[in-house]
Image (tube, rainbow, N blue to C red):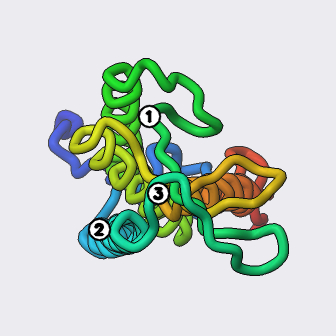
Amino acid sequence: MSEPARNDLPRRVDVRVGSSTNALQPISSVQRPVAAGAHQWLALLVVAGTAVVADQLTKSVVSMRLPLGNAVAAIGPFSIHHVQNSGIAFGLFADSTTAVIVLTTAAVAAMLIFFARSAQRHPLLPVALGLVIGGSVANLIDRVRLGHVTDFLDFDYWPAFNLADTFIVVGVALLFVSFVASDRTSPRLGTAPLSRS
């Protein structure tokens, strides 16, 4: 008399390596977490805070030591020229201070959200976004407090600007570099060859 087939035999366990949901997907192409951690937030705050302090300090010195409209020659075409700008770069939106404040606030909020989600994409991101956010906040402080920003770095062939503007430009350039570098180094799905045993 034969025993009936047992249905309680142990089943094979599907073991997968790494965090990929596809066992055939190479481990090198499994996406690693890119959200901001404590170190990224600290770096962002240090860079942004330093940018704000440096910008506000230089503007304060220029406002106290150099009357509005006056200039002091420095090197070649470069001079320290105390001017005020109620708009953004190159004097755009000079009569729309409220709109500039709203747009700047929205831009800073968007950058913080992006940073929270993608800070670990590239090591340069905390520095790059720190400079952009710090420069934006520094100019935003002036617009809210004074209704204008103080510009003092002047070249004969270029509109006057300040340290905050410089930080923003440098930060945007570093952002571009970090995006290009992260795209080149990130693995492409399905491109890594499967090893044969």
Label 3 amino acid? Leu
Q: Secondary structure at mark 3?
A: helix
**In the rendered image, is residue 17 in sight?**
no
- Circle 3 residue: 129
Work out whether mark 2 precedes mark 1 in sequence or the reverse, and give the earlier one: 2
Q: Secondary structure at mark 1?
A: loop
Q: Which mark is residue 135?
A: none
Which of the 4 quarters of the picture holds residue 194?
A: bottom right
Cβ atoms under marks 2 and 1 closer than 8 Å: no
Q: Which mark is residue 45?
A: 2
Label 2 amino acid? Leu
Q: CA distance from mark 2 to mark 1?
A: 27 Å
148 or 19, which lies in front? 148
Q: Is residue 86 above or below residue 189?
A: above
- Residue 35 x %, y %: 35, 55
- Circle 1 residue: 86
Can you tell which of label 2 and label 1 is closer to the viewer?
1
Q: Dot 3: within a 10 Å radius of its alpha carbon, few (fewer than 14), some, or many (20 or more) residues?
A: many
- Residue 72 x %, y %: 63, 72
- Residue 111 x %, y %: 40, 43
- Residue 48 x %, y %: 36, 65
Image quarter (top left, top right, bottom left or bottom right) of the N terminus = top left
Work out whether mark 3 precedes mark 2 in sequence or the reverse, and give the earlier one: 2
Which of the 4 quarters of the picture holds residue 5?
A: top left
Image quarter (top left, top right, bottom left or bottom right) of the C terminus = bottom right
Work out whether mark 3 precedes mark 1 in sequence or the reverse, and give the earlier one: 1
190 or 186, which lies in front? 186
Q: Dot 1: within a 10 Å radius of its alpha carbon, few (fewer than 14), some, or many (20 or more) residues?
A: many
Q: Is residue 110 above or below residue 12?
A: above
What's the residue at 34%, 50% (across, down)?
137
Q: Dot 2: within a 10 Å radius of its alpha carbon, few (fewer than 14), some, or many (20 or more) residues?
A: some
What's the residue at 62%, 55% (across, down)?
169
